Every structure is written in C-alpha cells, then in structure tokens.
Amino acid sequence: MGHSQKHSEENEKHHNEENGKRKKLPRRFYESELRKLQIELVKLQEWIKQEGLKVVVIFEGRDAAGKGGTIKRIIQTLNPRICKVVALGTPTEREKTQWYFQRYVPHLPAAGEMVLFDRSWYNRAGVEKVMGFCSEEEYWEFLRSCPNFERMLIRSGIILIKYWFSVSVEEQERRFQARINDPTKRWKLSPMDLKSRELWVEYSKAKDEMFAYTDTKNSPWWVVPSDDKKRARLNCIHHLLSMIPYEDLTPEPFELPERPDDKGYVRPPMDEQTFVPQIY
C-alpha cells in the first residue's frame, strides 16, 4: 500500500470519527435519556424563576443542521412564560434603518426568563454577508461591535450561551431531499436554503471569519456536531444544563383536595352547545 493511499484512508477514518459516524442510538435509549434531561430542564426553569436569572441561548448553524429540532425538545416540557423562543423574520424597511442590534434588544430576557434565539444577530455575519444583504462596511462594523455588545449583555447580568450546529454537506443534502419528499416539512426549504447549497464554501469562509472575531473568552462558541440528530440533541441539552448551576426545587407529590358538592348547579342542555364534528 502506497503512503498516499494509507494517508488517505487514515484521513477518511478520522473524518468519519469527527463526523460522528457511529452506530445509531437505539430509539428507546434516546427517548429515555431525553426524558431524564427534560426533567432536569424543568428543574433549571424553576431555578431561573426563583433566582431571577436572565438567560440567552443562541442557536446558529447551517440550514438543516438540527437547530429547530433541538429547540423543540428543550421547550417541550417548559413553561412558555419563562422559556421563550425568538425567531425573527426579514427586517422591515424601518428596522433596516435602525442600529443593527436594536430589533433584538426588546426580546432580551427580564429576570426569571430564558430566551432561545433560533438564529440571532449573527445573521449579519452569515446570510447577510454571503447573500449581499449588507454592505462591506456594515459587515465589518458588526464584527467589530458584536464582541462589545455581548460584553455589555454579560456585564448586565445576562448568561449568554452560543451554540453552532455543524453539519456535513452530505448530511445536509440528505435532509434537504427528505424535506422535499415530506409535505409537512417542505415549508422549511426556502429559496435562500437552496441557494446556500451553491454557496457552501462562501458560508464556510463567513463562519470562519465570524469565529475569529466572536469566539471570545467571555462568550465562546460551543460547536455541536449534528450529523447524528439524536446525539446532537442530547449532547446540547446536557451541556446547557451544565452551564448554569441549579438546585432541585421540585415540590413533593401532593394529594388533590376533594371537589366540593355542586350545590344545586344545573348544567345547560347539551344541545344548546356547538361541538366539533366527531370524525374520529
């Protein structure tokens, strides 16, 4: 075997290991672990509420990298008044004239809240840069000012956690095809997503530049390998729980009090109400 062939095979083996090409997690194990983590998320939620913490979690990454699925599992068992998801659309003409960070500031948490940003101010360093939606001056101003903006948030008492979901070009292609073939997921594919396939290298360069400026000691990026969705979800949630020390405030089980007598209450006739058709 030639040296170059051996080197190539070693690289391929390393690449496979880096991209998590391991045996799939059994569904029963995955669901069991997810359930345990979701119970811990509820404990974290109650701690955030009691202690008046302000938590911001940013989810970024390529299209179809698994951000939305992870967010969905995080909020599944939580109180939407405490844990909120922010997924802003295209800025309005008025918003385009504002200070860039201005439209994100109103969504920052008050005491006792956790906000999950499904994409965030980092749009400027990604899609806006690559697609030409901002000027070069606006782009470089963002890279210069973003670390200062995040330092201000942290100094104000906000706990800021940033996740980058990393997916391979092959896995992204597979997920795009799956979305095309599933009518319930086809809405997830926008013309911008399809365009991103052609601009893979440009997005890679933009991500590298973004990390160079914003992967700071105060506010680091945590990379989540996400070719394996189930592992990515479990690893991300487990890490999130490790980032905020919390105590278990779960109340002890209790008995429901007895329901009092109806005291002469008479229910109106059923035929006076309008019911949904009983199709099933």
Image (cartoon, rainbow, N blue to C red):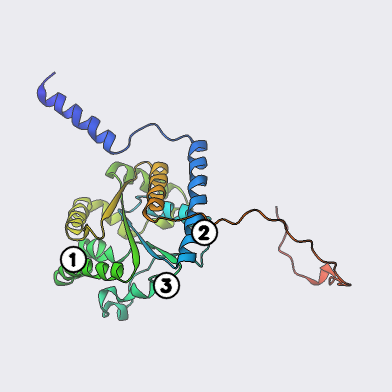
Q: Which residue is mark 2?
A: 78
How many marks overall? Answer: 3
Residue sitting nearer the eye, 129 or 35 = 35
Residue sitting nearer the eye, 222 or 271 = 222
Q: Residue furthest right?
A: 264
Q: Element type at marker 3?
A: loop
Whole-percent x, y for residue 4 in the image: 11, 26
Nearer-N-terminus badge (2/1)? 2
Q: Residue furthest left?
A: 3
Whole-percent x, y for residue 26 in the image: 47, 34
Residue sitting nearer the eye, 49 or 271 = 49
Q: Residue 235's image quarter?
A: top left
Q: CA distance from mark 2 to mark 3?
A: 17 Å
Q: Are marks 1 and 3 in contact (CB under 8 Å)?
A: no
Task: Name the amino acid, label 2.
Answer: Leu
Task: Name the amino acid, label 1.
Answer: Leu
Q: Which residue is mark 1?
A: 143
Q: Which residue is mark 3?
A: 110
Sort mark 1 into few (<14), some (14-19) or many (20+) by Cα contacts within 10 Å.
some
